[in-house]
Amino acid sequence: MTIIRSGSQAPVKGPAEYFTGDVTIEWQFSRDEPARLAGALVRFAAGARSAWHTHPLGQTLIVVSGTGWHQCEGEPRQEIRTGDIVFCEPGRRHWHGATPDSPMAHIALQEALDGKMVEWMEKVSDEEYLAENRADA
């Protein structure tokens, strides 16, 4: 059995190459093979967001506080709130983060395929982030 004790991991700043704004990553974990699960608590300050990215086996987000946005490419941006659970399909290009007026935190869970959990892409531009709720944003 492994227990990662509360407070035993220092929060880390979300890397600027993958996030815009103030993002903190806490409770980060991953399992050794043959298990594939990894996860973290990710906190977004108001206006902060991830870059576009995909996950080879999909991703599950559990919103634990605040209000945020999630958008899959080609679909309208969706508001997500405390208690919402979001599943993004394998290989689907997407981004997520806080709204301009509210911080948001979620637990992110994803599995590795051949050792890879995420493929990062370009940052979400301010224009894309602030676009009205359109599929072409």
Image (cartoon, grey):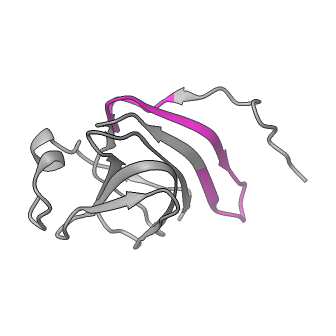
Q: Nearer the viewer, residue 19 or 115?
A: 19
- Residue 40 lies, with reference to residue 83, above or below; the image says above
- Residue 36 lies, with reference to residue 24, above or below; the image says below
Q: Residue at x 29, y 45 (%)?
A: 99
Relative to 106, is 54 on the left or the right?
left
Which image quadrant for residue 4? Answer: top right
Q: Quadrant of the C terminus?
A: bottom left
Relative to 39, is 106 on the left or the right?
left
Q: Nearer the viewer, residue 68 or 108?
A: 68
Q: Residue at x 28, y 51 (%)?
A: 52
Q: Nearer the viewer, residue 62 or 118?
A: 62
Queried whether the magenta region covers residue 80, the answer comes back as: no
Which image quadrant for residue 132? Answer: bottom left
Count the labels in the image.
0
- Residue 51 lies, with reference to residue 12, above or below; the image says below
Relative to 65, is 45 on the left or the right?
left
Relative to 34, is 64 on the left or the right?
left
Q: Residue at x 75, y 30 (%)?
A: 7
Q: Quadrant of the N terminus?
A: bottom right
Which percent across, then down, holds residue 3? Answer: 85, 46
Which percent across, then down, holds residue 36? Answer: 64, 62
Which percent across, then down, holds residue 56? Answer: 44, 66
Which percent across, then down, holds residue 27? Answer: 65, 41
The segment highlighted magenta reads 13-39
